[in-house]
Amino acid sequence: MINKMILKGAIDGGVENQFLLAQKYYHGIGESKNLPLAESWYKEAAKKGHTASEFMYAYMLLCGEAGHKDIKLGTKYLKRSAFSGYANAVLLLARNYYYGYGVKRNEKKAFRLWSKGAKQGLAEAEYYLGLCYSKGIYVKSNVRKSKKHLYNALNNGFEIAKTAISDLAFA
């Protein structure tokens, strides 16, 4: 059952309550999972600049989770959240720039966002920087820098980095 105080706060415009209510509907906590309703509450909080809501609203629009995709609007909110420093948004926007999803493909912007994420201590960003240095993506190939970032990723729990480190050993 949805907490009445959370619901009242959300209806009254409380941004944190709107986010909490969206989370409950998104994950099916206390109520049945309801993605369109989750999206509408994320949207309300996102319009007010709540960075986690901006990310979730963007994610839902980019993936079409609530039944429709809007890549342009999703990218707009993803950029807002990423430029506020929200970690998941930084990582997703970097991948979108690398693959050209919703934005023009741009390795330089992807690399810069992964660098920003690495400075925030994000293991996944360290991993992608390691790959950039390993494969010469946007930067000159540099085995030492590649290993540094891959080991940072591994030491912070990003286990996939083991494979890339092994690949470097046989390169």
Image: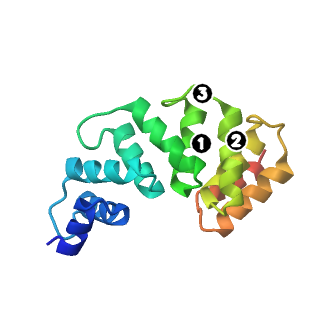
Q: CA distance from mark 1 to mark 3?
A: 10 Å
- Quadrant of image for the N terminus: bottom left
Give the residue type at disc 3. Arg
Q: Helix or strand or loop: what does disc 3 sit on?
A: loop
The answer to whether 66 is drawn above or below residue 156 in the figure is above
Foreground of the two, 55 or 167: 55
What's the mark number on residue 6?
none
Give the residue type at disc 1. Ala
Is there any visible trace of residue 39 in the rendered image? Answer: yes
Residue 153 horizontal/vertical position (percent): 67, 61
Q: Which residue is mark 3?
A: 105
Q: Helix or strand or loop: what does disc 1 sit on?
A: helix
Q: Residue at x 36, y 54 (%)?
A: 45
Q: Helix or strand or loop: what does disc 2 sit on?
A: helix
Q: Earlier in the sequence, mark 2 or mark 1?
A: 1
Q: Residue at x 68, y 33 (%)?
A: 107
- Quadrant of image for the C terminus: top right
What's the mark number on residue 94?
1
Give the residue type at disc 2. Phe
Q: CA distance from mark 2 to mark 1?
A: 7 Å
On the picture, is 104 further left or further right than 57? Answer: right
Callout 3 environment at 10 Å: few (<14), some (14 to 19), or many (20+)?
Answer: some
Q: Earlier in the sequence, mark 3 or mark 2?
A: 3
Q: CA distance from mark 3 to mark 2?
A: 12 Å
